Amino acid sequence: MIGPSVRHHFPGRIRFKVTELKQYSDIGEWIKTSLMAIQGIKLVRVNEHAQSIVVEYDTDILKPKTVEERVEQLDYQNSIQEESEHEFTRGDVAMNVIGTIAAALLPSKWGALSTATLIAPTLYEGISELKDKKVSVEVLDAIAVGLSAWRGDYRTAMMTQSLISLGEYMEQKTSRNSDELLADLMRPRDSLVWRVKNGTTEQVNSTVLEENDVIELGPGVAIPVDGTITKGNALVNQSSLTGENVPVRREEGAVVYSGTSVHEGTIQVRVDKVGSEATTAQIAKLIYDSLSEKSEIQQVTQDMANRRVKITLGIGAAVFALTQDINRVASVFLVDYSCALKLSTPVTFKSIMYRAAQQGLLFKGGSAIEKLVNVDTCVFDKTGTLTHGDMEVTDVIHFALKIVQGIC
């Protein structure tokens, strides 16, 4: 568990000192994504070297104490399953392109220096994988650029490095955007409600509600919390949770859930669960956590990609044994298609989940999506699943043109 301490606090902005950050690496994006999923947080900046987290928040929605509690609740163990990797930026891609041009135009000595500097991260990744006794795509990338640089072909080495960084940047950007968009889509929306206190009512934001508060809800009002009816009765529309479009009657003592709405009647509700404990927040968490679940297809493609690396290494060794030509060996390692298998699949699943969520369809991870391949028939138990009960005028059919003109 990350234990933060507040170093600076201004209205709407808190800077935390987190000494535990020095124990980990490459978790900045995970921290940002985790905190940005909280309603009311506008910006998160993480500096691992300075061991600090800066959080900017909406003071109308969140209290400083709430922000502190949410940062304290960050559990790094949840991010261990996520693969730690270097975050590529547009600057990395631009530097590699400049390095390619430099390798082609500058004298050999300077070309060698710039190439060695820019391919160092790729070589380090490959060596790290070998130390962990893994033969992966990163190992093949390191061998490809390393061999090209070793035989003095700096232009080829830098061209390969540029393509690697461009591919990684595009994959990470697409994946990160999908994560952020899904988090925003799943983030609960705040609303104004009437809180009953000491016999009087006051209008407050739903985000400031606490357990055992009592709120009054009338017709057409969305229920923002999970709670128990303490007074009154009403017809509650639960279609957002159950798919049933017919409102159900709820009386004193009955439980109502966030995400539903009052169709008719007025009730007072005692708050039982708010924030991350409420039903809608739990559904959002379920969908967001499903992003880290790997589907069977994704696991197969990753295994296939890693197996292809071993095959490529074997072919390279065979070519060298037969020809003793290092140039031909380098060509074998440069022509590799395993990255396409490994990188495209997770991005595809995340894009599908985001587009489906936009249309109101929630998938519980990639495994649920791939099961659709075997579906040949869809059965819906009621029309409310596909339709809604609000009547709309779609066409006006007139009997006499003069009458219609007279009305208009």
Image: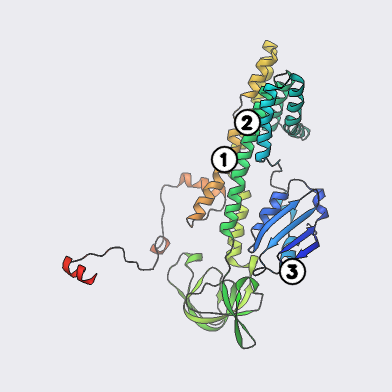
Q: Under tag 1, what secondary structure?
A: helix
Of pointers 3 and 1, the one earlier in the residue sequence: 3
Q: Is residue 379 shown above or below 125?
A: below
Q: Nearer the viewer, residue 17 or 21?
A: 17
Quarter of the rendering occupied by the C terminus = bottom left
For the residue marked with disc 3, what is the amino acid? Lys
Mark 2 or 1, closer to the camera:
2
Q: Position of residue 110 (x, y in %)?
A: 76, 23
Q: Nearer the viewer, residue 304 or 179?
A: 179
| Residue 193 image offset from top left, x and y in percent | 57, 76
Q: Secondary structure at mark 3?
A: helix
C-alpha span from label 3 to label 1: 41 Å
Q: Quadrant of residue 44?
A: bottom right
| Residue drawn at x 40%, y 50% as measured from the top left | 377
State the separation of the CA atoms marked 2 and 1: 19 Å
Label 2: how many Cα within 10 Å (few below 14, some 14–19, many 20+):
some
Q: Earlier in the sequence, mark 2 or mark 1?
A: 2
Tag 1: amino acid:
Thr
Answer above or below: position of 122 versus 26: above
Q: What is the spatial separation of the Cα atoms under label 2 and label 3, in whole angstroms?
A: 46 Å
Instruction: Write the residue at 77% across / 46% down.
Output: 25
Q: At x 52% / y 72%, what residue is drawn?
A: 222
Q: How many marks?
A: 3
Disc sitting over residue 163 in the figure = 2
**Residue 345, label in figure:** 1
Residue bearing the label numbered 3: 65
* Three-letter amino acid code at the position of disc 2: Leu
Q: Residue at x 60, y 56 (%)?
A: 183
Task: Select label 3 or label 1 by which is in front.
Answer: 3
- Look at the picture and state if 234 lies above or below 292: below
Q: Are marks 2 and 1 in contact (CB under 8 Å)?
A: no
> Can residue 97 be seen by looking at this rendering?
yes
